[in-house]
């Protein structure tokens, strides 16, 4: 976990629950404070800042529902996760309508607890980022289609907020699959042209003979097959924004015409003589080194200068690993709805694989990997077995234990066998109890109890 540890307030009138929650959350790297009832929770929130609150619904002094309403009235940005017994799920759902972020059912599932807390913290981080952008530019900035709270993405959001209200031409740089078109859409959506058309052209998808006609249109008889006049994308984008993806693939003729449009907002259709004027903002994107293309004579230097009024680089996914859990959750929800699957999240082992993979295909590859896993999923959580083989092949995966040098001797009791397996697993994980619990397929709390039972603490 990067940066200061997140602060979590645990509110429960059962001391044993508070002790258990403190142990689990502290092991995840969080700072944990406790309150024995709703009244104590309200007092703590008034005196300290917390990133998230875990609160029981039924408590003697001040119940969780009342405390929720009080805290939300004073600190609406804090995500509150309610904990409820089986018989009070209805009340918890009502509380969510009143402002709770989520709820957990007792007895708590440790993996579900950790995933819910992580989701709540990521949700709060997104809300905080939106508030920061509003303060930066003095108005709402909608970047909701772009997922990320990492430092590199905060720089992207700031750049969008600064350039969107202007008329500047923007050159969006980045590897394939990083989300350059989403950035272009966000710039348009936050610009004065938002109500006008947003037209996309993939310059790499069109043949050399069709590209110029697609961009600027053609007159009847301009070439074989041109049986009628056709409006080009620049005309269709009049008053709005045109996004030229893969701009490095433009033909020399198209480059010359584009340069003229950027200079004077004028052009002629292919085969035509009438000069047309348009009011269009140009956004362009590429995964190529255009400076190298200029040196090689493949791209016009004067056009590059015109395009690069405001360069904006979208970082590769490997440069922002902190965003992977948020992106994975987003894609899981999207594809679970699309394919009608009931899924709640990823197992810790599956998330660990996602975090350690290099993602050469960036966000696009992550999206495809999650969609594949959703289709293959058998349970409520995505597991490593459902991820693509190239992810499962990552060395050092937590579920991969080295083969035993020798089998356990015959004659041991089951408890002795269990004790030896736990001891060997801890030895393999270097004493890391969280990883050991994942390998053994049990919760960390269960492992803690087993260690005490077998004298391995």
Image (cartoon, helix red, strand yellow):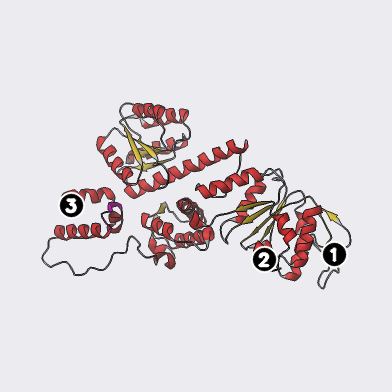
- Mark found first going from the N terminus, 1 or 3: 1
Q: Pinpoint residue 171: horizontal percent, then vertical percent.
A: 66, 55
- Extreme residue in the left direction: 411
Q: Which residue is mark 1?
A: 219
- Magenta residue check for 431: yes
Q: Nearer the viewer, residue 344 or 188?
A: 188
Q: Hey, which quadrant is residue 236 in on the image?
A: bottom right
**Label 3 residue SS:** loop
Q: Is residue 436 magenta?
A: no
Q: Residues within 10 Å of mark 2 (few under 14, many from 20)?
A: some
Q: Nearer the viewer, mark 1 or mark 2?
A: 2
Check the image and name the residue furthest to the right: 273
Q: Secondary structure at mark 1?
A: loop
CB under 8 Å between callouts 3 and 2? Answer: no
> From the viewer's perspective, is 435 left or right of 215?
left
Q: Label 2's element?
A: helix
| Horizontal side, residue 67 vs residue 366: left or right | left
Residue drawn where x is 55% and y is 38% of the image = 132
Label 1 CA crowd tier, 10 Å (few <14, some 14–19, many 20+)? some
Who's the residue at 75% across and 63% down the image?
Answer: 255
Eye-nearest disc, 1 or 3: 3
Q: Which residue is mark 2?
A: 293
- Stretch of the chain drawn in magenta: 429-434
Image-quadrant location for residue 348: bottom left
Q: What secondary structure do most residues of the magenta stretch adopt?
A: loop
Q: Is residue 323 left or right of residue 271?
A: left
Instruction: Tell me how many marks there are.
Output: 3
Residue where numbered disc 3 is placed: 456
């Amino acid at each position: 976990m990067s940066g200061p540890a997140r602060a979590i307030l645990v509110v429960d009138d059962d001391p044993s629950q508070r002790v258990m929650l403190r142990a689990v959350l502290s092991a995840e790297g969080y700072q944990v404070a406790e309150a024995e009832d709703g009244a104590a929770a309200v007092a703590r929130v008034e005196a300290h800042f917390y990133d998230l609150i875990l609160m029981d619904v039924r408590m003697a002094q001040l119940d969780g529902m009342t405390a929720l309403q009080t805290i939300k009235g004073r600190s609406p940005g804090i995500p509150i996760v309610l904990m409820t017994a089986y018989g009070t799920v209805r009340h918890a759902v009502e509380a969510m309508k009143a402002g709770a972020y989520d709820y957990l059912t007792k007895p708590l599932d440790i993996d579900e607890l950790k995933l819910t807390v992580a989701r709540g913290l990521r949700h709060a981080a997104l809300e905080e980022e939106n508030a920061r952008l509003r303060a930066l530019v003095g108005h709402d900035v909608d970047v909701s289609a772009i997922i990320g709270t990492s430092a590199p993405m905060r720089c992207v959001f700031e750049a969008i907020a600064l350039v969107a209200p202007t008329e500047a031409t923007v050159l969006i740089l980045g590897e394939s699959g990083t989300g350059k078109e989403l950035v272009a859409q966000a710039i348009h959506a936050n610009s004065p042209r938002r109500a006008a058309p947003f037209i996309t052209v993939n310059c790499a998808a069109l043949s050399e003979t069709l590209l110029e006609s697609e961009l600027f249109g053609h007159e009847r008889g301009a070439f074989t097959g041109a049986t009628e006049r056709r409006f080009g994308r620049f005309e269709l984008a009049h008053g709005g924004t045109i996004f030229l993806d893969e701009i490095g693939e433009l033909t020399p003729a198209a480059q010359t015409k584009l340069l003229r449009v950027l200079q004077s907002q004028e052009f002629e259709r292919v085969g035509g003589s009438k000069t047309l004027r348009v009011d269009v903002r140009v956004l362009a994107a590429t995964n190529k080194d255009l400076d190298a293309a200029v040196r090689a004579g493949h791209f016009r230097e004067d056009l590059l200068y015109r395009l690069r009024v405001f360069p904006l680089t979208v970082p590769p996914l490997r440069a922002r690993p902190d965003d992977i859990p948020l992106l994975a959750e987003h894609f899981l929800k999207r594809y679970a709805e699309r394919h009608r699957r009931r899924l709640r999240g990823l197992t810790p082992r599956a998330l660990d694989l996602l975090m350690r993979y290099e993602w050469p295909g960036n966000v696009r590859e992550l999206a495809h990997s999650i969609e594949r896993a959703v289709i293959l999923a058998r349970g409520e959580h995505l597991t490593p077995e459902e991820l693509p083989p190239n992810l499962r092949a990552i060395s050092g995966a937590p579920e991969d234990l080295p083969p035993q040098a020798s089998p356990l001797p015959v004659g041991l009791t089951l408890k002795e066998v269990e004790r030896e397996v736990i001891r060997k697993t801890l030895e393999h994980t270097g004493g890391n109890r969280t990883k050991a619990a994942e390998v053994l397929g049990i919760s960390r709390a269960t492992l803690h109890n087993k260690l005490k039972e077998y004298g391995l603490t």
